[in-house]
Amino acid sequence: MYHLYALYMKKRKKRYQFKKQFIKTINKQSIEKMIALTKKDYLSECIYVAPLKEEDKLFIESDDMSDSFLNRSKANNEIVMPEAYINTALWLLDLIKLSNNNLVKDGYIVPALYCFRHYLELIMKDSIHYFKINRGNISSNELGYDDNEHCLFNLWNSLRNFIDDESPQIRRVCNLIKELDNIDKGSTFFRYAFNHENGEIKEYDFPATMIDISELKKRMMQLYCFFEGINFMSRKS
């Protein structure tokens, strides 16, 4: 397994060559613009926005090449989308470390963890899908997993069936997945301000805790490398 993982790490740049140009554009100027996001007062800006007109739509076609295409990368969505979520999570953590604003520090960590959690869900489901295809368990147009399954630990246990490894590294990954899943079993903790059950509002019982952002970012990157290696093996198995 680790021979394949090492091979993946060597070929990683080749596999993601289409990302290189984007990475090169992240220079000092764009970093300064990202920091500015944490200082911008969008509330005061919204005061001067004109009210909606009858003909207004959310999605207006554009000829400006600086704008975004929606679904341009549909053939590569299974690679592009998880990558976008993990990069967004890491970017938000960088913003937190660079900001002196407590609202930024305490607010941005929530979407950062949501994006990270969603990355893990996407990459594990994708790996399960390809392991099953390459082992002849399913056809290429079948998911291979329960599309209503959002529990990270259940997904990890399903993926674990395809990983022939009992090393300490596997146990450590398992511990981190379990730690995150214990906080957010229902995939709601990072999406809603409060818990709810049978129409009643219930506060989350997770205590207020100061989180080491640098260590959190390191764990995210370690898990990113691990699961990208597993995903590579699932596609090449």
Image: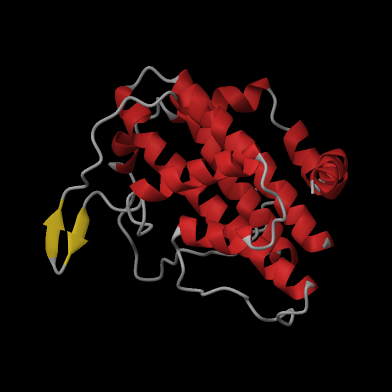
Quadrant of the rendered image containing residue 7: top right
Q: Is residue 148 left or right of residue 135?
A: left
Q: Is residue 67 visible?
A: no
Q: Is residue 102 left or right of residue 172?
A: left
Quadrant of the rendered image containing residue 81: bottom right
Q: Is residue 232 left or right of residue 122?
A: right
Outermost top residue: 100
Q: How is the image coloured?
A: secondary structure
Quadrant of the rendered image containing residue 99: top left
Q: Quadrant of the C terminus?
A: bottom right
Residue 70 vertical placement versus 5 (above, below): below
- Give residue 204's position: percent from left, percent from top: 22, 47
- Give residue 88's position: percent from left, percent from top: 55, 41
- Give residue 26's position: percent from left, percent from top: 69, 30
In the foreground, 174 or 11? 174
Q: Is residue 89 visible?
A: yes
- Give residue 149's position: percent from left, percent from top: 46, 68
Counting every numbered tag in the picture gives: 0
In the foreground, 200 or 237? 237
Residue depicted at x 60% and y 25%:
31
Q: Is residue 227 left or right of residue 175?
A: right
Residue depicted at x 73% and y 67%:
131
Residue depicted at x 42% and y 43%:
179
In the foreground, 136 or 142? 136
Outermost front residue: 166
